[in-house]
Amino acid sequence: MKKLLLLMFAITSCTSDLVEFENIQETPESLFIQEPSGLKLESYIVNNKVRINTKLSFEGEYRIKILDFTNTVVNQEIIKGNKGDNILNIYVSSLPVSSYTVELYTKNNIFVGRQNFSMH
């Protein structure tokens, strides 16, 4: 029964929209990335949402994955990113209190960046 509930949670978590773009004029200092591409979280301690910067080398489709502490994917979404800084909100209030990893990959599954956060 417990495995069935975990499977149902994983399925529903992977289909919900947790990622939302945020329109900004300038990248905040807390999200600045010096490299040509990468991923940066505004905070590593999170309550309801966390802002992230996905700095991209080229425009296109990217995959954002959220993994739990056992490296199980609990959510993943495809985003259309622009070249340069892309500020996103990730809503995590539906996730259990725990530690997580956010990973960013290109459409061709090339690794771009990884950051960790903990639910508070």
Image: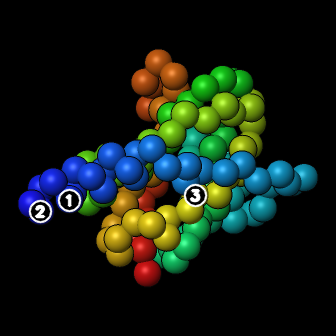
The single residue placed furthest to the left in the displayed view is: 1
Total residue callouts: 3
| Left or right position of 93 against 85 | left
Q: How far apart are the two marked residues, 1 and 2, measured between alpha carbons? A: 5 Å
Which residue corresponds to mark 3? 90
User: Can residue 79 be seen by looking at this rendering?
Assistant: yes
* Above-or-below relation of 20 to 85: below
* Above-or-below relation of 69 to 58: below
What residue do we see at 30% from left, 56% from top? 9
Which residue corresponds to mark 2? 2
What is the x, y in percent for residue 62? 56, 30
Q: How far apart are the two marked residues, 2 and 3, measured between alpha carbons? A: 27 Å
For label 2, the SS is: helix
Quarter of the image with the N terminus is bottom left
What residue do we see at 71% from left, 24% from top? 59
Instruction: Tell me which label, 1 or 3, sits earlier in the chain.
Output: 1
For label 3, the SS is: strand
Residue 5, numbered label: 1
What residue do we see at 66% from left, 40% from top? 55
The answer to whether the residue labelled 1 contacts the one labelled 2, judged by CB atoms less than 8 Å apart, is yes
The single residue placed furthest to the top in the displayed view is: 108
